[in-house]
Amino acid sequence: MAEKKATGTTFDTVMHDLRAGIFAPVYVLMGEESYYIDLVTDYIAEHALREEERDFNQTVVFGADVNAGQVADMARRYPMMAERQVVIVKEAQNIKNWERLESYLEKPQPSTVLVIAYKNGKIDGRKKILTIAQKAGVVFESKKKRDYELPSFIEAHLREKGCTIDNKSAQMIAEHIGADLSRLASELDKVVLSMSENEPKKVTPEIVERQIGVSKDFNGFELRSAIAERSVVKANRIINYFDKNPKSGSAFMLIPVLFTYFQNLMLAFYAPNKTNENDLAQWLDLRSGWAAREYMLGMRNYSGMKVMQIIGKIRETDAKSKGLDNPNTSIGELMKELVFFILH
């Protein structure tokens, strides 16, 4: 579940120090992905102080309720009958005038752990506060996961819970839930809790179908496989299923799956070694050689020119699904038209 920042600070390195009882005087946690920000913040809140020390030595405020000067004043206080005090600023993106905190960060109180949780973006890199904070403690940027990174996140999360998962199941979950890591982790935890203690803890397509509600036969993963194989019957069976069962999925879920596949397929044509799974996977930035097999199959079934035309058609379908130049065609009909264009 490593989450990297340009400076080299990762979620794993931050958590390694925290679990070892090493607390920095300053943590600036920022980024589009709130999941890792919450994990670090919650760990500090639960472990930096003993339970009986928190009443007098742990302060939690929200950015909309304080200014930078007030945060600095809180951080300068001394702990009461404890080794340290903890000051946590949640929703820190609402704070104005960061400059008023710079003087404190230049010489932070050694007995204070100040946590600035800045969500839905990051502090302007041109501001001095980031450089100063990095010298004083930890600056960590939590970035959104890309779609191709989600299966790895799922595998790692389940591994921590003592579970394994096959590739198809991981793809099914990733495509159904998407890149909301908090929701993804919550759904995975539910799956783990549903499994019997007496059974091997392996998540299979059948378990995903039963616990998360994703059909093991009719999903984005299977549609992509059918498209790669150029299987007309299988692809149309899946798209008709989605048309009749709109709660199972929609164009808004399937279009990104198809676009990503054909975008990567176009890149695959330019790979230095298109015949080796591992080399092609590395070229496409995929997790392993098995993930490149559908692209090797796709290069046999589609020409480069056809792939370019398909990408254009997917863009057109995406626009029409959002109401652009489309007065009355349903999403189901748009998807059937798209699949027909791809396969013929």
Image (cartoon, grey):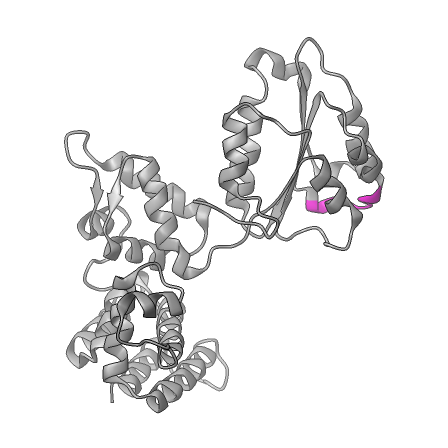
- In-image side of 289 versus 2 (left or right): left
Q: Is residue 181 above or below residue 305?
A: above
At a point 64% along the width and 29% down the height, the residue shown is 24
At a point 74% along the width and 46% down the height, the residue shown is 131
- In-image side of 54 versus 286 (left or right): right
Q: Is residue 250 above or below residue 1?
A: below
Asked if residue 65 lies in the magenta stretch, the reply is no
| Percent coordinates x, y for residue 301 in the rendering | 23, 83
| Percent coordinates x, y for residue 228 in the rendering | 25, 76
- In-image side of 165 versus 32 (left or right): left
Q: Is residue 117 above or below residue 282?
A: above
At a point 45% along the width and 81% down the height, the residue shown is 315
* Residue 50 placement: quadrant: top right
Q: How many marks?
A: 0
The N terminus: image quadrant: top left
The C terminus: image quadrant: bottom left
Query: What residue span does the magenta drawing correspond to?
Result: 93-99
| Percent coordinates x, y for residue 132 in the rendering | 76, 41
| Percent coordinates x, y for residue 216 in the rendering | 20, 58
Front one among 157 and 278: 278
Asked if residue 94 lies in the magenta stretch, the reply is yes
At a point 68% along the width and 35% down the height, the residue shown is 137
- In-image side of 228 versus 73 (left or right): left
